[in-house]
Image (tube, rainbow, N blue to C red):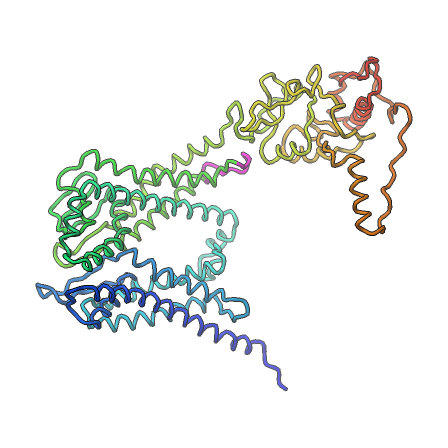
Amino acid sequence: MTQRAPQVTADRNRAPALVSALLRGVVAAGLGLGALAVLVVVVWISSPYPDSGPDGALRAAAGIWLLAHGAGLVRPDTLSGVPAPVGVVPLLLAVGPLWLTHRAARDAADPEEGDPAPSRTGAFCAVTAGYLLVVAGAAAYARGGALRADPDTLAFPVAVVVAGAAAAGVWTAAGRPLGPLPSWSPLALQEAVARTLFRDRAEAACRSAAVGVAVLLGGGALLVAVALGRNAAVAQDAFLGLAGDWAGRIAVLLLAVALVPNAALWGASYGLGPGFALGAGATATPLGLDGTPAVPRFPLLAAVPEPGPGSWPNWAAAAVPVAAALAVAWFTVRRAAPADAPHARAWSWRETARVTLLAALGCGLATAVLAAWAGGPLGTGELSAFGPVWWLTGPAAFAWTAVIGVPTALLLRLWRLRTPGWAWRGDVADAQESPAADADAGDGRATYEEAFEDEFEGTYEEDAGGAAGRPRRWWAPWRGRGAADGDGGPGGAADPAGSSVPAPAKASAKAPGAAFGAQSGTATGSDGPGFEPYDFLPTDPWHEKGAREARWASLQRSSGGLMADFPAGPAEPAGPAGPAEPAEPAGTAGPAASGAGRGACGADVKAAKAVKGTTDGQGTDGPDGDGRAATP
């Protein structure tokens, strides 16, 4: 038998996957169109005075569905006989089709286990093609209805919107990577995106920009709500006057709810300064309403300010872009100078300013796109322009967030990196302390766990008395080492007898904490004045001999007798153990000898001090005859 080539098998497996992706696009478009058609038919059935049959209602539903994608509609039946364009897109209606397209592309690019998976490019093209087939059929069907689709708007923006939603779905299925870029993109840009640092900064800028846009929309919605509350009677009269039956009022209410995101964008544009157009010859800004507005009777339009110059309530709308700029700065600084990270990991002020500027640029671009989508014509003549002007709203959003956000981000960075006296953060570097203060700090001990915290959360500081203390934390700023904790005697020296771990007999090699202190950049390294051979040895009972024997016995029982008995250690002397090496005379133990042990000679003096510390911990009488040797 002839064996099939792997390429032929792969191609045959990929063909059903592409067909499945195409069908997913068709189903996604059909679900959106069907749901809207059901809603329109229900409203038509409940209306006591329908002006057309079910065919007219379905054609109107197809036109509204195309409008949700950004297509321009045309009303051929008008009083003047001139077709009137309709270009204001209800943004809430656009959420459903975009989400369905995104979901279809995501599932096509990442199918269930066992199903053939197409390539990412194939999934994108198949889902987009399937969706656009339904768009073309809906446009052809709506041509004979009361709302016809403009053929010029089917390619842009309808096809672009569908392709963007499908691309976002494939990108989500791939894990939302920030690269690599296509091969036809500039080489310098490809190299920049390949760097991890660039991707991290770009992600921070995108998140901050998204937060800025969300704050702008929230502030705009708040402005609209306050204005509607002040003009509640006008809004109620407009709502009751548009329809006399409950079916008509429900239809007006649904249309008003679908236009709520548009109203939020109009309010954001009003706060930014450019305002919004109320016809071809009227513009509403915080400074006042100029011209004669051609406002139709609609409940949401009751929030439009009255003609004339503005006052301080109108000027207070400028708080919306200020809040957006502060939000952009705050979320950027959260990544630039995290509260739980050391000082060395913070971004420089140039990087912070650069990322804030990128976030401001992204906020401006997103606001311009949304403003272009939220406005449009409602007819001809004076009704030819409604909503915010995108080429003014976008630059205004960028200017507000950049002018206020960049200085605020730099000030917040300085505030988060400040080093107050009580050190609420643990990132005060020991390099700022003078060597003389370290030399006079004493010989306090720190456990291995505390040294590990010092490496990542902070370093040692000086307490009010001038002695080196444990790293102060925000939850316990009074913590310190020395006589205050009772672990030091006269002169601030620690009592080795308080430690549960005996010092090693010889310390010619560096202690385990030496390299740790040297890496952290503090004075606790092997050459630092505060170093002792067993500074970072563990002091918990886990390492005691009794605990080790108990663990060994448990493992021996579990092994069924395969393990040997606990290895016996070296025999301990019956009497007080003498030093393994000649101990340092009492007359030479003092600050001079201690300083020499921390100097260049290092190894021999450290070994002698470690041995002497062992004998002190065992209670051997020293030269003073009172059970303690002279403190180095």
Residue 581 lies left or right of residue 445; in this view the side is right
- Residue 557 in the image: state x and y as whole percent: 81, 48
Residue that appears at 23% across and 49% down: 388
- Residue 213's place in the image compared with 467, above or below, is below
Residue 184 lies left or right of residue 275; in this view the side is right
- Residue 439's place in the image compared with 416, above or below, is above
In-front residue for pair 111/356: 111
- Residue 512 in the image: state x and y as whole percent: 73, 35
Image quarter of residue 404: top left
Image quarter of residue 356: top left
Residue 148 lies left or right of residue 523; in this view the side is left
Residue that appears at 25% across and 58% down: 89
In-front residue for pair 64/388: 64
Q: Magenta segment: does it hold 345?
A: yes
Residue that appears at 84% across and 17% down: 621
Q: Which quadrant would the C terminus be assigned to in this image? A: top right
Which residue range is magenta in the image?
Answer: 340-351
In-front residue for pair 393/212: 212
